[in-house]
Image (cartoon, rainbow, N blue to C red):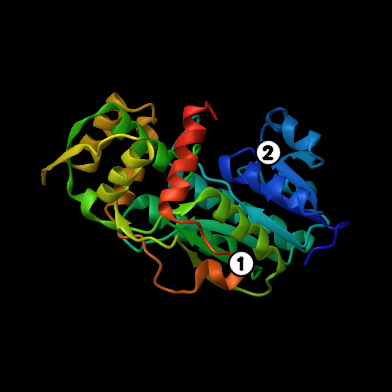
Amino acid sequence: MASSAEPVLVAGSTGYIGRRLALRLVRGGNAVRCMARNPARAGDLEEAGCEVVAGDVLDRESLRWPLSGVRVAYYLVHSMGRGASGDFAESDLKGASNFAEAAAEVGVERIVYLGGLGEGRSRHLRSRHETAQALGSTGIDVTYMRAAVVIGAGSESFQTIYWLVRRLPAMVTPRWTSVRTQPIGIDDVVECLARALKLDGNSEIQIGGPDVTTYGGLMDETAKAMGRRPPLRIGVPFLTPRLSSLWLGLITPVDVGVARPLIEGLSTETVVTQPPGPEELGVQPESLGTVLRKAVAEIEAGG
């Protein structure tokens, strides 16, 4: 495990998962170096004791200093989101390649990356897998952690489900609502990432919660966590990912540019096929009902 004097780099530290991970690591006694395109957004991390540095994965020269002196680096960068420009898959691949090359040049030994479960045709999921391959392209060891829907107030996937349930007592739903998934709570994801610091070598770890459901079932369970009756769902076969994303853009605050690749990913089954997953790291994930109640309470409290 990294010593308290040896910095651990978190790239993507101002994102939802990256911010929580950085705080978890610094509370655990690790020296944490947080890399962000806009360090001004990381004031809370600096106050918590993290070192905050500027760096952009699309600018290779900006990566040498953040990665210098680091043995383990977390890569939690994703180009799909608000403010992104161009093709997110192309940007993700370039960013990961730049990061891997710069990391190899300065002697980084291992990269920990959080990607997605599922092997379908979705560009979103395919891009996540290609990112993992790019991170290992220079021979650096990669811990490739893979999760399905992350249940938490800042998760775009969960926000989509939450706002659909909140705003629609009945909805026309496409076939993806019958696809199986194995959600996991944000606290368990962060704990798995933090404990991955002690691993060595290359590994793929699939993480999921104890409950397997469908996306329709996830809507029903979210409604229960909100104290509501589950919405009436009327299935139709012709609602394409494009139409679904436009519909979501009207009903929910989730950005259409984010919604479409997310919806494409929802058409792929995302369940753990290589156990034991979190248990391998000593983590016992909380039940779906528990993490949903926590996420709903955080959203409704404005968090």
State the image quarter where residue 162 is shown.
Answer: top left
Q: Is residue 132 left or right of residue 72?
A: left
Which residue is the site of mark 2?
Answer: 36
- How far across and how far down the image is residue 239, in percent? 16, 40
State the image quarter where residue 68 is shown.
Answer: bottom right
Q: Is residue 61 left or right of residue 299?
A: right
- How far across and how far down the image is residue 227, in percent? 35, 35
Q: Against 128, is 292 above or below?
A: above
Q: Secondary structure at mark 1?
A: strand
Which residue is the site of mark 1?
Answer: 142
Depth check, front residue: 137 or 209: 209
In the image, farthest residue toward the right: 5
State the count of labels: 2
Q: Residue at the location (54% across, 66% down)? A: 278
Q: CA distance from mark 2 to mark 1?
A: 21 Å
Q: Against 118, is 166 above or below?
A: above
Q: Secondary structure at mark 2?
A: strand
Q: Residue at the location (29% across, 32% down)? A: 248
Q: Residue at the location (36% across, 51% down)? A: 123
Q: Residue at the location (73% across, 44% down)? A: 34
- How far across and how far down the image is residue 177, in percent? 23, 49
Q: Against 51, is 139 above or below?
A: below
- Quarter of the image that includes the N terminus: bottom right
How many residues crowd mark 2 within 10 Å: few (<14), some (14–19), many (20+)? many
How many residues crowd mark 1 within 10 Å: few (<14), some (14–19), many (20+)? many
Q: Is residue 12 visible?
A: no
Which label belongs to residue 242? Answer: none
